[in-house]
Amino acid sequence: MTDRNSTGFNGMVQRDLEYIAKRGPVTDLKIIVLTVIEVITGKGAC
């Protein structure tokens, strides 16, 4: 996961474009797994 809270608008757009280029089941699974890990550990919480 990335530090979305410190990313400006251009960074968010860039991240979206990277996702579009790499999208697929493996990328989605990776995002889900990393999200679950962050929720469990509390890492990245505001």
Image (cartoon, rainbow, N blue to C red):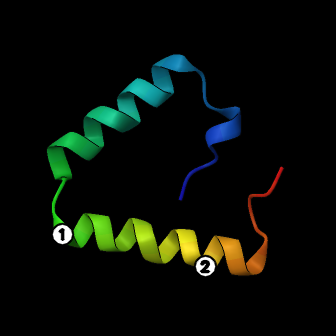
Q: Please provide percent x and percent y for residue 13.
A: 39, 25
Identify which residue is drawn at 66% across, 71% down: 38
For the residues labelled 2 and 1, say whether their Cβ atoms are less than 8 Å apart: no
Q: Which quadrant of the view contains residue 17?
A: top left
In the rendered view, does 37 fall on the left or right side of 19?
Answer: right
Residue 25's disc is: 1
Q: Does 18 appear above or below 32?
A: above
In the rendered view, does 12 fall on the left or right side of 22?
Answer: right
Residue type at the position of mark 1: Pro
- Within 10 Å of the Cα at label 2, are there few (<14), some (14-19), or many (20+) other Cα atoms? few
Q: Please provide percent x and percent y for residue 37.
A: 61, 79
In the rendered view, does 25 fall on the left or right side of 38?
Answer: left
Q: Does 6 appear above or below 1?
A: above
Tell which circle, 2 or 1, labels the residue nearer the N-terminal end: 1
- Within 10 Å of the Cα at label 1, are there few (<14), some (14-19), or many (20+) other Cα atoms? few
Q: Please provide percent x and percent y for residue 11.
A: 49, 27
Viewer-closest of 3 and 28: 28
Q: Which residue is mark 2?
A: 37
Identify which residue is drawn at 84% across, 49% down: 46
Viewer-closest of 9 and 32: 32
Secondary element under disc 2, as helix, strand or loop, is: helix
Residue type at the position of mark 2: Ile
